[in-house]
Image: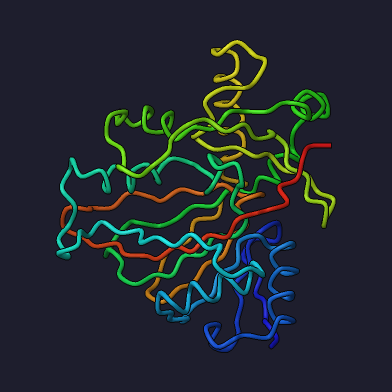
Amino acid sequence: MSVTLQVINPNFVAEGRAGPLREISDPDAFREFVEILAQFPVLVFRDQPFTDDEQIKFAERLSGRSGHVFFSRMTNLDDDKRTLKADDFRRVYYLSTRLWHTDGSCSSTPSRFSMLSAKMLPGKGGETEFADMRGAYDSLSEDMKIELNSMCAEHSRAYSRHLIGAENVDSPDETIGGVVQPLIYLDRFTGRKSLYLSSNATKIIGLPLPDGRLLLRDLIEHATERRFVYRHEWRVNDFVIWDNRVTMHRARPYDDESQIRDLRRATTPDHGMGISA
C-alpha cells in the first residue's frame, strides 16, 4: 500500500490519501505509516469510516502489539444518547480536553500514537488544535535548551482538574497520582528533540513550586504560539493520527448543550519513551 501525501504544514502536518485504511493488514504498510509519522507527526485522512473494532485493530497493527490499545469514546452523549449534564464526571473529563495536553503523560508508560475517528460533529466549533513541540524546542535559545535538558516534571490529572475547578469530580475508576517525565524528549529514530509538556504538568522536580509552575506556563505559552499550531476542522469520517511524544493538542469549545460531538479515540503505549540526552 502506498500513501500519497499533501503537506499542510511542512514542519509537522500532512494529509494522507490512500485506500480504505481499515482493510490494511500488511506489516510493511504499517512500517510506512511509522516512517511518515516520524516526518509528519500529525497525519490527516478524509473519508475513512471505521467501526470501533476496526479502529482498535488498526491501532494494534500500528503499534505492533495486540491487546495494548486504550480505546475511548470522546463524546458529550450519555448512554441514552442525551447530552451530558453539567455535573456528570464524564462531561468534566471531556471539558478537560480543552486544556493543552499530551495523551498518557500521567502514565508510567506514556502514549505514543493516538487516533481519532469522527462520527458526529457540531455545526460550529469543536475543532482540535495540535502544537509542534519539535519546532517549539528548536526555537528556544541554546542556554534554555541546556537548562531544560536535565529537568523533569511531575504530571498529575489532579492538577488539570484543579485548573478547571473540578478537583472533586473524578471518574470512579481513575488514578490521578503523579508521574515524573523528562521535559525534553529525544527521538532516537530521527535524532530530534522536542518539548514534552501538558497541562497535567504540576511541578518541575528540584525547583520551588512557584518557579516551576511559572516556567511550565512560559513553555506552554511558547509552544502554542500560532506559528507552531495547526487547527483541524473536522468532517464526518475524518481519521487523524498523531504522535504524542512530539505534539500537544486540545479540543475547542462548541455548544455542548444542544450540539453533538462524537469521536472515538484509540491510543497506543510507547514502551521505549526516550530520555533527554
Q: Horizontal and vertical percent for residue 151?
A: 72, 26
Q: Is residue 57 above or below residue 177?
A: below
Give me the residue at 31% from left, 38% from top: 170
Q: Horizontal and vertical percent for residue 29?
A: 70, 81
Q: How many marks?
A: 0
Q: Is residue 88 above or below residue 121?
A: above
User: Is 58 placed left or right of 245 in the picture?
Assistant: left
Q: Horizontal and vertical percent for residue 74?
A: 36, 58
**Image quarter in which the C terminus is found:** top right
Q: Nearer the viewer, residue 152 or 64?
A: 64
Give me the residue at 52% from left, 26% from top: 202
Q: Is residue 263 above or below residue 140?
A: below
Q: Nearer the viewer, residue 160 or 44?
A: 160
Quarter where residue 173 is shown: top left
Give me the residue at 56% from left, 65% from top: 241
Quarter where residue 112 is shown: bottom right
Q: Horizontal and vertical percent for residue 13?
A: 63, 62
User: Is 103 placed left or right of 75 in the picture?
Assistant: right
**Image quarter in which the N terminus is found:** bottom right
Quarter where residue 118 is shown: bottom left
Q: How is the image coloured?
A: rainbow
Q: Nearer the viewer, residue 133 or 272?
A: 272
User: Is 140 placed left or right of 132 in the picture?
Assistant: right
Give me the residue at 14% from left, 61% from top: 82
Q: Nearer the viewer, residue 275 or 109?
A: 109
